[in-house]
Amino acid sequence: MSADWPILSATIWLPILGGLLVLGSGDKAPNVSRWLALVISVLTFLVSLLLYSGFDVATSAMQFEENIPWIEAFQINYHLGIDGISMPLILLTTFITILVVAAGWEVIQYKPSQYMAAFLIMEGVMVGVFAALDAMLFYVFWEAMLIPMFLIIGVWGGPNRVYATIKFFLYTFFGSVFMLVALIYMYFQSGSMEILAFHDLKLGLGPQILIFIAFLMAFAVKVPMWPVHTWLPDAHVEAPTGGSVILAAIMLKIGGYGFLRFCLPITPDASNELDWLIIGMSLIAVVYIGFVALVQQDMKKLIAYSSIAHMGFVTLGFYIVFIILHKADVTSGAVLGMQGGMVQMVSHGFISSAMFLCVGVLYDRMHSRQIADYGGVVNTMPWFAAFMVFFAMANAGLPGTSGFIGEFMVILASFRADFWFAFLAATTLIVGAAYTLWMVKRVVFGDIANDQVAALEDINKREFIILAALAVFVLVLGLWPAPLIEVMDVSIENLVKHIAVSKL
């Protein structure tokens, strides 16, 4: 389906141009720039809902396509389109941005217009990453994400922010260079920059492996997979609350999306040859990083490590596909693994955002993230404690919350591949419950530990609305995941069929 009017372009450019408008409003009247940013983010979300309402779930073809020549000499086009894989992620992006703008409302006193503008521009660029069907356009948006994030952590971050930003920038930039080389190689092979043309490009095993490694370097850093994960806890600890939310909810998903859009369909044979590598890295992330989270003293660091463990599920779900396909003609297990990975991505977007916002609420009041400085918060902040316990349960994968659905689907699919994969993946449910609930026990429950906690005030209306909105989504997705799974079902089935056919 092509759109009568360019909905995708509107979803990309409305926040970017709106961000420039907020930037221009300056800090003379900070409330003007705040309200302006909120109105633009809500409008963008409403425009993106048209993608859902007009989406045809029965086809795996790209929908809402826009194709305008851009750099004609190199056949580079401004080509946008979405399928069932990218659409949920765009909706997640536009929704989370509203919450981020609302979360920084009172907290950000230093240059609020620039802060809001950075997030709006970031939103537009991230939607561009999910919607781009031209490899060069994808790359431009991919690199453009770094700049607002770099500024957000570098300007509004904590005391160690310069170290964290440079580490974040170098890690992600290093990976991207390899991806660019791979894209240019495929352009010379196919004579086009279209991502869908790359999907059908016949490549030998040698080139496939090299392209696969190049993509892996770019996407593994973004997800982040073990051992290139170390930038994430640093970036999270130093980033302001809004920065942490966007980083956890959206930016990590772009790595997962890259695997589904590039690695698997372009290099199916190399993915099949090297699936052990990804499965190994995923299982280490799930098990080992869980134990690393267990010993953290800083709440943000704990949630950052928990994110790495949860994203391990995503990459595991994507790469057990080949083992299942080899075993028997059971495509259902393969589809289940990928769907589980996708559901996990969306669910983690909501849960990790909520967890970081909860830590942000405490930090705004006491200016400490150390677990040891708290205790007995439930006595002074009962509403907040209720939300925090609920999100902690969801993070540990309690049935009935969205955290359970994705993990359960990936564990079920892992059984089809190998018992030990499923066993190792399922240990995370225990370790995840251990570090999450132990943190909650020490922060929320017990007697009031110090005078600062005794003086805390419960959440205000703004904070209540933000947390309640996330709680509704976590609950609805946990009890009724059907709308999400229905949207991506045909696209993922098509992808599994595509990667089951060798290109050699």
Image: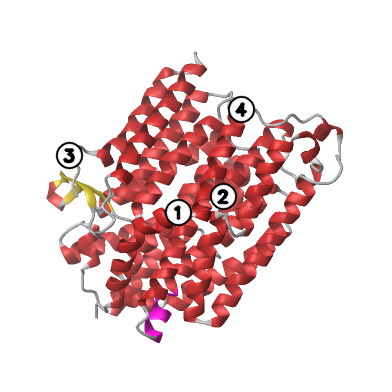
**C-beta proximity under 8 Å, tags 4 and 3:** no
Seen in the picture, residue 346 relative to 242 is either above or below; the reply is: below
| Whole-percent x, y for residue 229 in the image | 55, 59
| Whole-percent x, y for residue 27 in the image | 49, 18
The disc, 3 or 2, on the residue closer to the chain's N-terminal end is 3
Looking at the image, is mark 4 or mark 1 nearer the viewer? 4
Disc sitting over residue 461 in the figure: 4
Looking at the image, is mark 1 or mark 3 nearer the viewer? 3
Is residue 352 covered in magenta?
A: no
What is the C-alpha distance between the residues marked 3 and 2? 35 Å
Q: What secondary structure is found at the residue carrying circle 4?
A: helix
Splitting the image into 4 quarters, where does residue 46 fall? top left
Q: Which residues are magenta?
A: 320-327
Q: Which residue is mark 1?
A: 253
* Residue at the (65%, 54%) spot, across then down: 393
Seen in the picture, residue 99 relative to 37 is either above or below; the reply is: below
What is the C-alpha distance between the residues marked 4 and 1? 30 Å
* Residue at the (32%, 74%) spot, across then down: 268
Q: Residues within 10 Å of mark 3 (few under 14, many from 20)?
A: few
